[in-house]
Image (cartoon, rainbow, N blue to C red):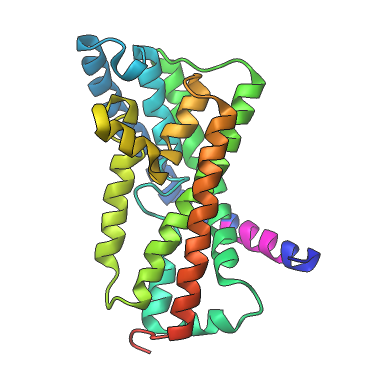
């Protein structure tokens, strides 16, 4: 990728950031929703950890911190939807994707850049307030070392890549399906369950816990949270996340290649 192409994708990312920045009312509503949902989960976790201290290897403060980290990352990583996939699937269904394929840009990198811009905005606009609110009104365990926060942010970026790669595969299913809504909804359900958004994956028992922690969705929340909480080494976590990102992005390119060769555009 040349310097000119690199600047193009930076511009696309910046455009994605500005695009979501215009939805101020929706952003405020999202912050409110994340905070309220965080409160519901926090009181549920407090009751659960009161009965079972050190559940999943977390103390109560770590469990509460996990909740607010989840609310901070929910929109940024589009764990429950809200990413680029709706728009791409609609463009495939209507045939507008044919225009995208004629552009002198890479389809996957174009949507990745746009999604990175969206994710950065959501992280700042919808992620900071719930985390600050939680740290002010509940017992949390946040590190003071800048290096730990830096490692956490690296893990979040890698989680963004994994999340994009998963949702890109979901979106490409529209090339073969008349309506990809079912696949998209299944992706959301699996993402919420297997990322740790509903319950930390460390709590899952036996082989189920081992399996879900090895799946790519654990890169979205569980991995960054454990880095911040000191429950996992940064280097090992980075390798795990980067491995899934590279593998899934590669699969996405293969599926994209098959889809664009076929170019069966629904409704077009």
Residue farthest to the front, as pictured:
207
Q: Could you tell me which residue is drawn at 53 percent across and 84 percent down?
A: 99
Q: Could you tell me which residue is drawn at 57 percent across and 53 percent down?
A: 116
Of helix, strand and loop, which mostly describes the magenta segment?
helix
44 or 241, nearer to the observer: 241
Residue farthest to the bottom, as pictured:
268
Q: Give the left or right position of residue 208, taking residue 221 as reference.
A: left
Q: Was residue 127 drawn as part of the magenta stretch in this picture?
A: no
Query: Is 239 rendered above or below residue 49?
Result: below
Q: Was residue 12 drawn as part of the magenta stretch in this picture?
A: yes
Q: Position of residue 35 (x, y in %)?
A: 36, 32
73 or 175, nearer to the observer: 175
Q: Point out the image quarter for the C terminus.
A: bottom left
Residue farthest to the right, as pictured:
3
Query: Is 135 rendered above or below residue 123?
Result: above
Query: Is 191 rendered above or below residue 46?
Result: below
Q: Position of residue 160 (x, y in %)?
A: 51, 47
Q: Could you tell me which residue is drawn at 42 percent across and 68 percent down?
A: 87
Q: Could you tell me which residue is drawn at 73 percent across and 65 percent down?
A: 1
90 or 213, nearer to the observer: 213
Residue 22 visible from this viewpoint:
no
Q: Give the left or right position of residue 155, taking residue 140 as reference.
A: right
Kindly indicate the quadrant of the structure image that contains residue 194: top left
Query: Is 161 rendered above or below residue 177?
Result: above
Segment tinted magenta in the rendering: 8-16
Q: Give the left or right position of residue 255, taking residue 148 as reference.
A: left
Residue 120 visible from this viewpoint:
yes
59 or 129, nearer to the observer: 59
């Amino acid at each position: 990728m040349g310097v000119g192409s690199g600047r193009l994708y930076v511009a696309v990312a910046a455009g994605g950031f500005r695009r979501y920045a215009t939805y101020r009312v929706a952003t405020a509503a999202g912050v409110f929703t994340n905070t309220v949902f965080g409160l519901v989960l926090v009181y549920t976790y407090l009751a659960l950890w009161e009965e079972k201290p050190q559940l999943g290897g977390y103390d109560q403060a770590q469990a509460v911190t996990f909740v607010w980290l989840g609310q901070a990352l929910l929109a940024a990583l589009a764990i429950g939807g809200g990413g680029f996939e709706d728009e791409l699937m609609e463009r495939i269904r209507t045939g507008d994707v044919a225009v995208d394929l004629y552009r002198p840009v890479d389809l996957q990198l174009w949507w990745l850049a746009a999604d990175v811009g969206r994710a950065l905005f959501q992280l700042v606009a919808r992620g900071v307030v719930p985390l600050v609110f939680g740290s002010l009104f509940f017992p949390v365990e946040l590190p003071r070392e800048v290096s730990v926060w830096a490692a956490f942010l690296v893990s979040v970026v890698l989680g963004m890549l994994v999340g994009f790669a998963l949702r890109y595969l979901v979106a490409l299913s529209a090339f073969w399906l008349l309506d990809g809504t079912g696949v998209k909804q299944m992706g959301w359900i699996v993402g919420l369950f297997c990322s740790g958004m509903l319950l930390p994956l460390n709590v899952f028992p036996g082989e189920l816990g081992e399996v879900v922690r090895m799946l790519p969705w654990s890169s979205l929340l569980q991995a960054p949270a454990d880095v911040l909480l000191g429950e996992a080494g940064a280097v090992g976590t980075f390798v795990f996340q980067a491995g899934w990102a590279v593998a899934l992005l590669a699969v996405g390119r293969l599926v994209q290649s098959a889809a664009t060769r076929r170019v069966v555009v629904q409704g077009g």
